[in-house]
Image (cartoon, rainbow, N blue to C red):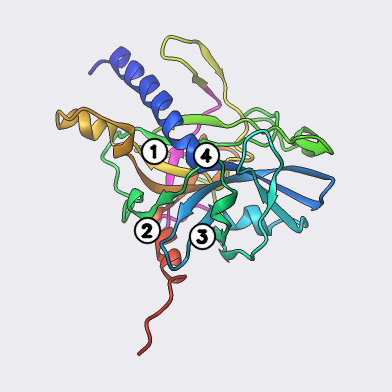
Amino acid sequence: MNQAELDQIAQETKERMAHFVTQYVTPISRSDSPDYGWAGGTGSYTWLGDSLGAYLLTNDHVVNNSEARLICHLPRQNQEYVVVEKPFHSWPEPIDFACAPINLEILSDEKVCLCLDMFDDRYHPINHELLFFLGFPGTTLSRWDPANENRTLYSWGNELEVPGYPFLTQAVAESLDMVPSRYNHEFHELIHFPGEAKREANGEMIEVCSPRGLSGSLLWDTKRIACYANGVEWQPEYARVCGMIWLAGEESPVLVATRIEHILGKIQTLFPRPAI
């Protein structure tokens, strides 16, 4: 496979994965008043079985590292955000995971829940596999712009519009000169997230958006390269969740993702224990 072929495969994979994953994801907003709010992160709808029901998954820091008392999601596009009424179960970094039960009936026909069998039991993409995530950058900043709260997306009595963006990337295979100080090799993987990238296979390099707001995005092992290597015709349904994005390198072109086995380990603690 030459570079041109890989670029075409990457573009097709990104487009088809975006169409597939959109139904599971939502922007998350934060607020301390029903009259306004601001973009806060990314969440995913997941069915945790009949005993637990539907849950919203995201990062711990998305819901806890803020003075905002209202955490909201958008179950129906172009309508109002809905407050998460029940408390979050949360675990701080290095796992940085939070989840809360939601009412399944409020989801629109365009939104559905992931099932746990769509999660790999551990992070194990093959070498050079294409990884995907879809998140909601909550700012108009670019990748290397310094933090600026004035560029955060806000709503004052109007609809909060936070567009979702699909990203196709790969795990970092080489050693880096600079690794985020909060990266922990026992829990995390490093994912490429440069300052410039192509939006289309034959397009020009453009600035990548700021990672602020991508926190909580689920990372997918697309299985595209694995299928190619085995002569299998790939479908987006073969993809599996392999991690969760939670941190961006401030001086290195990477994102940090928690490996999925650590997320699943915390989810398992929510299930009722059988009586002895």
Question: Quick one: label 2 or label 4, which is nearer the N terminus?
Answer: 4
Give amino acid for label 4.
Asp
What residue is drawn where x is 84% and y is 38%?
156
Magenta segment boundaries in residue numbering? 182-196
- For mark 3, give the secondary structure: loop
Which of labels 1 and 4 is toward the front? 4
**Which residue is tagged 2?**
261
**Which residue is tagged 3?**
94
Q: Is residue 128 magenta?
A: no
- For mark 4, give the secondary structure: loop
**Which residue is tagged 4?**
109
Toward which corner of the image does residue 214 lie, by quadrant?
Answer: top right
Question: Quick one: label 4 or label 3, which is nearer the N terminus?
Answer: 3
**Magenta segment main secondary structure:** loop
Q: Quadrant of the C terminus?
A: bottom left
Give amino acid for label 1.
Val
Which of labels 2 and 3 is toward the front? 2
How far across and down, in percent of the image, does residue 34 sit?
82, 50
How far across and down, in percent of the image, does residue 128 sit?
30, 33
How far across and down, in percent of the image, does residue 70 sit?
74, 55
Toward which corner of the image does residue 220 lie, by quadrant?
Answer: top left
What residue is drawn where x is 52% and y is 39%?
109
Question: Quick one: label 2 or label 1, which is nearer the N terminus?
Answer: 1
| Mark 3 and mark 1: Cα distance apart in space | 19 Å
Which of labels 2 and 4 is toward the front? 4
**Which residue is tagged 1?**
172
Question: Quick one: label 2 or label 3, which is nearer the N terminus?
Answer: 3
- For mark 1, give the secondary structure: loop
Q: Quadrant of the N terminus?
A: top left
